[in-house]
């Protein structure tokens, strides 16, 4: 691990705090998400369905596409 001077470490901490304050204003920036295999949109994980049941290897469908596939 590289040694960082005390002043350098405090600068890094200040940068981290600035970044977290900026990101706190962006709603949903840390929300878990995935890319739907059918519509290719980035979606939240709520309501997702596996493309192949029993494995996540092939990805997921969003709730909207899963409802269309169920018809």
Image: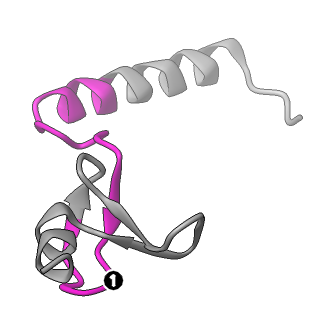
Q: Mark 1 packing: few (<14 Cα in 10 Å), some, or many (20+)? A: some
Q: Quadrant of the C terminus?
A: bottom left
Q: Residue 46, relative to residue 22: is it above or below?
A: below
Pointer 1 residue: 37
Is 40 inside the magenta-drawn segment?
Answer: yes
Which residue is drawn at the image coordinates 18% and 85% (left, top)? 39
- Left or right, 51 with reference to 6: left
| Extreme-right residue of the structure | 1
**Residue placed most toward the observer, 61 or 42:** 61
* Residue 9 screen position, x and y as percent: 62, 20
Which residue is drawn at the image coordinates 21% and 61% (left, top)? 43
- Left or right, 32 with reference to 58: left
Q: Residue 39, relative to residue 57: is it above or below?
A: below
Q: Residue 56, relative to residue 51: is it above or below?
A: above
* Residue 35 screen position, x and y as percent: 32, 72
Residue 32 picture quarter? top left
Callout 1 secondary element = loop
Which residue is drawn at the image coordinates 59% and 64% (left, top)? 54
Which residue is drawn at the image coordinates 29% and 75% (left, top)? 36
Is 22 inside the magenta-drawn segment?
Answer: yes
Residue 57 picture quarter? bottom right
Q: Quadrant of the N terminus?
A: top right
In the rendered structure, which segment of residues is drawn in magenta? 18-42
């Amino acid at each position: 691990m590289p040694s960082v001077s005390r002043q350098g470490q405090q600068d890094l901490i200040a940068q981290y705090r600035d970044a977290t304050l900026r990101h706190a204003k962006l709603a949903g920036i840390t929300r878990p998400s995935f890319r739907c295999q059918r519509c290719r949109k980035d979606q939240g994980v709520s309501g997702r369905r596996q493309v192949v049941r029993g494995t996540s290897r092939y990805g997921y469908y969003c709730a909207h596409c899963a409802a269309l596939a169920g018809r």
